[in-house]
Image: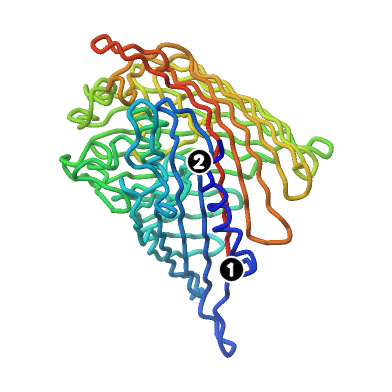
């Protein structure tokens, strides 16, 4: 049965349609005072399985307002603030054990009370050959960019880059702090299943941590009682001077914890009126110093990373076609992980080709994953996407709520995603999206040997999202 709040959630965004769309330029008497942008988003769970695992209750909103100053010799000041909370107190934050589960990843706190954050305060510089970033905001690199729903992760960083010749881009940066956004709770619990592999290595809501607050990367990775570290050093080089092809190499050095190397090649080759879309990727992680030794947390994170060792490889390939004017797309993806450990994924990264809406199993130990994805524009502004992913059984310990804090994988995992997106031309800036996800965890069917409780870790989930940007 559809939850009526879904209609209310959509109306929250649709009702602003007459306000217009696009950035608002602050000009007065011929003077430029910068640019304002805003966004209002409402999200609602319509139906889900009442099995205590599939998130069954969640109705949330976020409002964002950003400001960009006029450019002065290539410099710009930027700021953005977010506000998040429950819609009309309609989310159940006291679910029945074994029957319901709150969609905690839609909120900045455990009660859904309204909470805001100044996520971005930074100074940027850019010209033909140089660029730089200093302050707080989102950092666009493969291991710091993550899908978000309502409020994004944010970082405190200093980064600079150069483009000395056409197609060549070199950069160096230092990230010292991170702030968990709304989806961080999903990345830790529902997607990550307390494995520490899906972009978050610590439960964001535990004592000593929190969301919408900046913490040293030592605490973000190892727990609230960990020592401060100097942070994460990011170096990159990319080259797009080859015909239709871009090569990128990234190195991420985290003091006393890890070193990760990521390489990818992306090629979009014209083929008649279509494009052949090809890609390959490789991710390698090793421990540095004590690595993850002394990591805080429950039995699953201790089992996966408590000895301090890190030894992980990820290989990936993708191939697809992009139809004329992107009318349709079709892709096949593959990832294979190996090594003695899973990928310690503490700072929000998600470059794997086979990541889906609610699964990132490729970052677990010894996983063979493949996926299919296709999309089709039904009419201008209305697009349908379908995807299916299969993840081989890993060697990573996870947690199942109300069953066990340390489960052994029982079978392959899979996920089916069906997404319909509508952007009406009549209301510029409005996007209405609905999606259905059927998912089975690799811990489905696990039986707790002490209590006899058996995990029903399956999902049948329908959600509605409405966004208005102006």
Q: Nearer the viewer, residue 154 or 417?
A: 417
* Within-10-Å neighbours for mark 2: few <14, some 14–19, many 20+: many
Name the side, left or right, on which 274 lies relative to 113.
right
Q: Position of residue 237 (x, y in %)?
A: 49, 43
Tell me which colouring the rendered structure shows.
Answer: rainbow
Q: Nearer the viewer, residue 440 or 209?
A: 440
Q: Nearer the viewer, residue 316 or 300?
A: 300
The residue at 26%/34% (across/down) is: 257
Can you tell which of label 2 and label 1 is closer to the viewer? 2
Q: Quadrant of residue 265?
A: top right
The residue at 40%/36% (across/down) is: 187
In this view, the residue farthest toward the bottom is 29
Q: Position of residue 340 (x, y in %)?
A: 34, 16
Q: Which residue is mark 2?
A: 45
Q: Quadrant of residue 366?
A: top left
Where disc 1 sits, the SS reads: loop
CA separation in Å, label 2 and label 1: 30 Å
Q: Nearer the viewer, residue 428 or 327?
A: 428
Instruction: Count how many numbered circles sit on residues in the image.
Output: 2
Q: Is residue 436 above or below residue 300?
A: below
Mark linked to residue 322? none
Q: Position of residue 277 (x, y in %)?
A: 68, 34
Q: Quadrant of the C terminus?
A: bottom right
The residue at 53%/23% (across/down) is: 335
Tell me which label, 2 or 1, sits earlier in the chain: 1
Q: Is residue 119 above or below residue 240?
A: below
Q: Which residue is mark 1?
A: 23
Where disc 2 sits, the SS reads: strand
């Amino acid at each position: 049965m559809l939850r009526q709040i879904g209609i209310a959630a959509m109306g929250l965004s649709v009702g602003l349609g007459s306000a217009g769309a696009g950035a608002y330029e602050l000009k007065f008497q011929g003077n430029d005072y910068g640019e304002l942008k805003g966004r209002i988003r409402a999200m609602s769970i319509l139906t889900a399985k009442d099995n205590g695992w599939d998130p069954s209750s969640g109705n949330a909103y976020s409002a964002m307002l950003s400001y960009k100053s006029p450019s002065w010799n290539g410099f710009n000041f930027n700021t953005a603030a977010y506000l998040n909370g429950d819609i009309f107190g309609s989310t159940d934050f006291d679910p029945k054990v074994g029957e319901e589960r709150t969609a905690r990843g839609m909120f900045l706190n455990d009660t859904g009370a309204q909470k805001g954050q100044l996520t971005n305060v930074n100074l940027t510089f850019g010209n033909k050959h140089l660029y730089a970033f200093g302050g707080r905001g989102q950092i666009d690199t493969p291991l710091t960019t993550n899908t978000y729903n309502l409020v994004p992760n944010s970082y405190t960083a200093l980064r600079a880059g150069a483009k000395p010749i056409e197609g060549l881009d070199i950069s160096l940066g230092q990230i010292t702090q991170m702030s968990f956004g709304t989806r961080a709770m999903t990345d830790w619990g529902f997607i990550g299943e307390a494995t520490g592999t899906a972009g978050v290595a610590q439960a964001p809501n535990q004592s000593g941590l929190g969301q919408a607050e900046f913490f040293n990367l030592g605490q973000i990775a190892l727990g609230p009682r960990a020592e401060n570290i100097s942070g994460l050093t990011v170096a990159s080089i990319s080259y797009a001077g080859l015909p239709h092809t871009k090569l990128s190499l990234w190195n991420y050095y985290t003091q006393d914890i890890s070193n990760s190397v990521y390489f990818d090649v992306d090629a979009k080759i014209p083929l008649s009126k279509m494009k052949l879309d090809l890609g390959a990727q490789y991710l390698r992680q090793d421990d540095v110093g004590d690595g993850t030794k002394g990591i805080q947390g429950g039995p699953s994170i201790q089992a996966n990373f408590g000895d301090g060792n890190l030894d992980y490889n990820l290989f990936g390939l993708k191939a697809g076609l992009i139809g004329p004017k992107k009318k349709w797309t079709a892709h096949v993806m593959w990832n294979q992980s190996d090594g003695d450990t899973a990928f310690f994924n503490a700072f929000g990264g998600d470059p794997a080709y086979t990541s889906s809406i609610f699964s990132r199993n490729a970052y677990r130990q010894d996983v063979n994953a493949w996926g299919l994805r296709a999309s089709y524009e039904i009419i201008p502004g209305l697009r349908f996407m379908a995807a299916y992913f299969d993840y081989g059984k890993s060697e990573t310990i996870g947690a199942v709520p109300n069953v066990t804090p340390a489960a052994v994988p029982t079978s392959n995992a899979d996920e089916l995603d069906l997404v319909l997106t509508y952007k009406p031309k009549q209301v510029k800036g409005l996007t209405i999206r609905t999606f259905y996800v059927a998912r089975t965890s690799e811990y489905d069917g696990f039986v707790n040997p002490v209590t006899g409780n058996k995990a029903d870790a399956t999902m049948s989930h329908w959600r509605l999202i409405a966004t208005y940007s102006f």
